[in-house]
């Protein structure tokens, strides 16, 4: 009898190397805050538009300038999407380092003034 090897399972295709470092990370808190900001901007725009139309003699409830509002909210959503796709905690400083990149253990006098002159 001839032994037949079973067919090998299909291998998962990997992403091209350009996409290899992308590991999306959900940012639900930021997304919720983005929705709250969007809702606040829409309410403010309706208030502004209605006031302007009322002063002009028209009793209409409308958004002040819907095109600018949509462009601005779209830019905020695009920035949020890029942060999700980056997948890194870009909003957190590196642990153990300050803004100048110096270790926390160094005394402030050495950081600010350099070594003491004798």
Image (spheres, grey):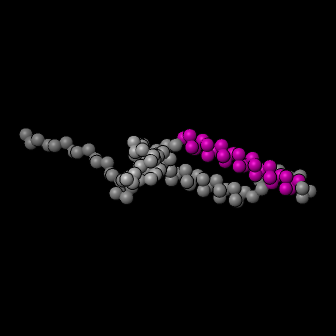
Residue found at the very far right of the displayed protein: 57
Residue 106 in picture, x, y percent from top left = 40, 45
Residue 105 in picture, x, y percent from top left = 39, 42
Residue 104 in picture, x, y percent from top left = 42, 43
Residue 87 in picture, x, y percent from top left = 45, 47
Please report the residue visible at 65 percent of the width from the left and 56 percent of the height from the top. Answer: 72
Foreground of the two, 56 or 110 = 110
Whether residue 52 appears in magenta in the rendering, the answer is yes
Q: Quadrant of residue 35?
A: top right
Decide if residue 78 is in sight here: yes
Please report the residue visible at 61 percent of the width from the left and 46 percent of the height from the top. Answer: 34
Residue found at the very far front of the displayed protein: 118
Please report the residue visible at 78 percent of the width from the left and 50 percent of the height from the top. Answer: 46
Q: Quadrant of residue 71?
A: bottom right
Q: Quadrant of residue 52?
A: bottom right
Whether residue 83 appears in magenta in the rendering, the answer is no
Q: Is residue 102 left or right of residue 57?
A: left
Decide if residue 24 is in sight here: no
Q: Is residue 37 left or right of residue 43?
A: left
Image quadrant holding the N terminus, namely top left
Q: Which residues are magenta?
A: 28-54
Magenta span: chief secondary structure = helix
Q: Is residue 102 left or right of residue 71?
A: left
Please report the residue visible at 75 percent of the width from the left and 47 percent of the height from the top. Answer: 43
């Amino acid at each position: 009898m001839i032994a037949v090897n079973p067919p090998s399972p299909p291998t998962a295709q990997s992403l091209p190397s350009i996409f290899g470092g992308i590991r999306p990370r959900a940012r639900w808190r930021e997304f919720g805050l983005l929705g709250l900001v969007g809702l606040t901007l829409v309410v403010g725009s309706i208030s502004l538009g209605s006031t302007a139309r009322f002063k002009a003699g028209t009793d209409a409830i409308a958004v002040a300038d819907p095109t600018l509002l949509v462009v601005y909210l779209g830019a905020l959503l695009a920035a949020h999407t890029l942060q999700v796709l980056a997948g890194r905690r870009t909003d957190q400083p590196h642990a153990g380092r300050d803004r100048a990149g110096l270790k926390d253990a160094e005394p402030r006098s050495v950081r600010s003034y350099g070594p003491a002159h004798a």
